[in-house]
Amino acid sequence: MQDLCWLLDRGYASHSATELVGNRHNLTSRQRMAVSRCACSLGDAQHRRRLQFPPADVRGRELWLDGYNVLTVIESALAGGVVLLGRDGCCRDIAGIHRRYRKVDETASALRMVGETAADWGVTCCRWWLDKPVSNSGRLKTLINEMAASAGWNMPVELVFNPDRVLWESEHVIATSDGIVLDRCRQWVNLTRQIIVERIPQARLLNLSRPDGTTGT
């Protein structure tokens, strides 16, 4: 992380910098993915933190979620998978979503934690945005709608081809750990980290937030 962030701070492209560092330290493909997801330049990290809202400031506002991004990280934490804490303070997983989503044992608990946290924060609406091309998005939408109706949450779900663009163009507060979206959005809240810290104490959190090796916050 220290070597990769050093290169990013000096303008190296992420792909070539990750390849250089991975080769230097003989990292596996999974290890390269982990450090590349957690690393960013100091300038990017500072920019993202300037746009970050504390949970108290979300009360009375709409919260828009990068649906799969939020859900899969919480699912991983609940399942005992490794969750990575990056330089920008965001939690990320290694699995990710490609063309297909599969409901797991932890899905319902993860959705419940999101709904309860949004309710505790006093948001007026917690709107999920899911990738329409991803298989089973329709089924996940139905599951979220049923859970929201049962709990009395205002938690609608939208299926669109490009949630990232919707989120970074939105005037509402968003929740994501996608670096590209964070760099372009207007305001965001660190929902997944808050849930993991407060509700999943057993999470296997690997702290890579400080590239100099010191403990992150």
Image (cartoon, helix red, strand yellow):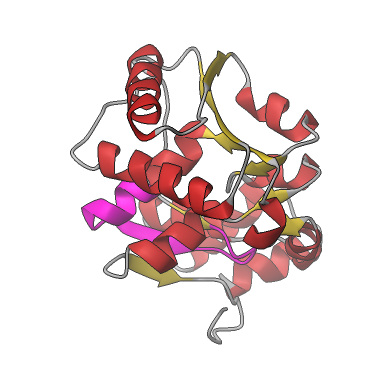
Q: Quadrant of the N terminus?
A: bottom right
Q: Is residue 217 left or right of residue 49?
A: left
Is residue 56 visible in the rendered image? The answer is yes
Which residue extends farthest bottom? 214
* Residue at the (60%, 65%) spot, across then down: 89
Q: Position of residue 25 (x, y in %)?
A: 46, 68
* Residue at the (81%, 62%) spot, across then down: 50
Q: To which quarter of the image does residue 10 belong?
A: bottom right
* Residue at the (41%, 67%) spot, across then down: 198
Q: To which quarter of the image does residue 160 belong?
A: top right
Q: Position of residue 30 (x, y in %)?
A: 37, 51
* Residue at the (59%, 14%) spot, across then down: 161
The answer to whether 98 is drawn above or below residue 191 in the figure is: above
Q: Which residues are magenta?
A: 74-90
Q: Position of residue 69 (x, y in %)?
A: 49, 39
Q: Position of residue 2 (x, y in %)?
A: 60, 75
